Every structure is written in structure tokens, then in C-alpha cells.
Amino acid sequence: MVMDTVGNKTPGLLSWSATCVVRADGKIGLPSGPKLTSSTGPVGSPVKAWQRTIVLDRRVCVVVVEAQGTDPLPSETDIQRFLGSFKEVR
């Protein structure tokens, strides 16, 4: 597998990241696992993160904004702008 990740954290540990993974055989997901689908939603109770999973032709990308320390999550507008900013370029 090849994995590319980019991310950053604020001093108060608000984390922004994007990770894309591709398998050497070009297939998506685990060989015997369920089919992966694109989705966006909150994570945790109470919500401490938002995650977007993007299933592309030969890779899966996961985009996350997560409050890991004292910083709160940003506004929903900022969260959705960040999650929506990742697009496939052909």
C-alpha cells in the first residue's frame, strides 16, 4: 500500500488532515471486507471530529478535522469548506 498524508495542528491541538491510500493491486478496501462508499459525518459523542471518506477509482481518501485538545471544532461552515475542498483531479 502507498499512503500520502498532509496535515497540521494548531497550538491548541485542532487537527486538520487528509490521507489517501492505494493498494498495490489497485483494488479498493480489504479483499474480504465490505464495499467502501463515500460518506461525510460527525465522529464521536459528543462530536469531537468530522470525517469525509472519498472513494475514487483506485484509492480511498479520508479527510478529517478533529478537536484533540483545548481548541473547539471550527464552525460548521469552515468544517464543510475544508471537507469539500478535496477533489479528484484527472
Image (cartoon, rainbow, N blue to C red):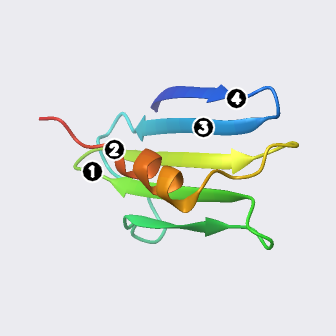
Reading the image, the residue beneath label 1 is 56
Query: Distance from label 4 to label 1 (Cα)?
Result: 26 Å
Regarding residue 3, the answer to whether it shows in the image is: yes
Does 28 sit above or below residue 11? Answer: below
Regarding residue 30, the answer to whether it shows in the image is: no
Query: Distance from label 3 to label 4 (Cα)?
Result: 6 Å
Of tags 3 and 1, the one toward the viewer is 3
Residue 86 image offset from top left, x and y in percent:
34, 42
Residue 46 image offset from top left, x and y in percent:
80, 71
Q: Residue at x 82, y 33 (%)?
A: 12
Q: Earlier in the sequence, mark 3 or mark 4?
A: 4
Q: As shown in the figure, which amino acid type bears the numbered disc 3?
A: Trp
Q: As shown in the figure, which amino acid type bears the numbered disc 1?
A: Leu
Query: Distance from label 1 to label 2 (Cα)?
Result: 5 Å
Q: Residue at x 34, y 44 (%)?
A: 59
Cβ atoms under marks 3 and 2 closer than 8 Å: no
Residue 64 image offset from top left, x and y in percent:
57, 48
86 or 30: which is nearer to us? 86
Query: Distance from label 4 to label 2 (Cα)?
Result: 25 Å
Reading the image, the residue beneath label 2 is 59
Query: Where is the C terminus found, in terms of image quarters?
Result: top left
Of tags 4 and 1, the one toward the viewer is 4
Q: Secondary structure at mark 1?
A: loop
Disc number placed over residue 9 in the picture, else none: 4
- Crowding near pointer 4: few (<14 within 10 Å), some, many (20+)? some
Cβ atoms under marks 1 and 2 closer than 8 Å: yes
Q: Earlier in the sequence, mark 4 or mark 2?
A: 4
Q: Residue at x 63, y 26 (%)?
A: 8
